[in-house]
Amino acid sequence: MHLVLIWIFLLGSPQFIQSLAQSPPNFQKDEKDLDAIVNFKNKKVPKAILGPVKEALEYFPELEEVDITFEFKERISGAVMQAQPKVLSLFVDPLEKRKYRIKITRTLEFEDKVIPIEKIPNDALVGWIGHELGHIMDYLKRSTGNMMRFGFKYLTSKEKVVEAEYTADGYAIVCGMGHQILATKNYILNHDGFEDDYKDKIKNLYMSPDQIETLLETLDR
């Protein structure tokens, strides 16, 4: 059971993996090359989000040499983005050479429309990416065993989820991304298209806008 949960944390559910072969409904890319991959500084990034990714990475100089692949996915169960170590790298590469990936939902599918991820407000997108980079900052010094224990606890303990999400937000805010992290939260919570269940998840597991503003005021003193 433990191994199954860890596998889901690292790769996603079998149903999700199978769904990757399907095309996103109700969305046709105007320019095919938007999904083309651009390589720079150990990063692989879809062209469509190259600008926001570079903007977010500017706040994390510690990640300049870290190998990170940004991957578009049709959907991610319960999330819009998800940062993980690459499975093979987790077991084969030394800690300082470990490779990571950030999965990103290609489109936000609302009841009345479909929005390509690159079309959401820039600050909200940069903040979303910054939050995931905060997770990678948290993973950098975790050993393989520690990472596996972390994954198991993340899938079985609400308290561990809250701790992990607050930590990721905290890294991004301390790095100077408070404005963007706040923009992401407000975009989700104030957008009519997101389901109430998803908004409740954001309210219950992540820093609230008030908490972010309080932290920013504390850091400014």
Image (cartoon, rainbow, N blue to C red):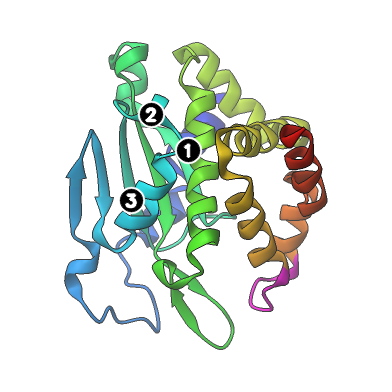
Query: Which quadrant holds the C terminus?
Result: top right
User: What secondary structure is marked by label 1?
Assistant: helix
| CA neighbours of label 2 inside 10 A, class few (<14), some (14 to 19), many (20+) | some
Q: Residue visible at 22% across and 35% down?
A: 41
Prevailing secondary structure class for the magenta stretch in the rendered image:
loop
From the image, state whether disc 3 or disc 1 is nearer to you: 1
Circles 2 and 1: CB distance less than 8 Å? yes
Question: Horizontally, is 13 left or right of 65 in the view?
Answer: right
| CA neighbours of label 1 inside 10 A, class few (<14), some (14 to 19), many (20+) | many
Residue 63 is tagged as 2
Q: Is residue 3 visible?
A: no
Q: Disc 2 or 1, which lies upstream in sequence?
A: 2
Q: Residue furthest front?
A: 221
Q: Is residue 49 magenta?
A: no
Circles 2 and 3: CB distance less than 8 Å? no
Magenta stretch, residue numbers: 190-196
Q: Residue visible at 40% across and 40% down?
A: 58
Circles 3 and 1: CB distance less than 8 Å? no
User: What secondary structure is marked by label 2?
Assistant: helix
Q: Residue visible at 38% across and 28% down?
A: 63
Q: CA separation, marks 3 and 1?
A: 14 Å
User: What secondary structure is marked by label 3?
Assistant: strand
**Residue at the disc numbered 3:** 71
The amino acid sitting under disc 3 is Glu
Instruction: Estimate the x, y position of residue 124 in percent, counting from the top left.
Output: 55, 60
Q: Is residue 191 magenta?
A: yes
Q: Disc 2 or 3, which lies upstream in sequence?
A: 2
Residue 133 is tagged as 1
Q: CA separation, marks 2 and 1?
A: 8 Å
The amino acid sitting under disc 1 is Leu
Q: Residue visible at 37% across and 58% down?
A: 73
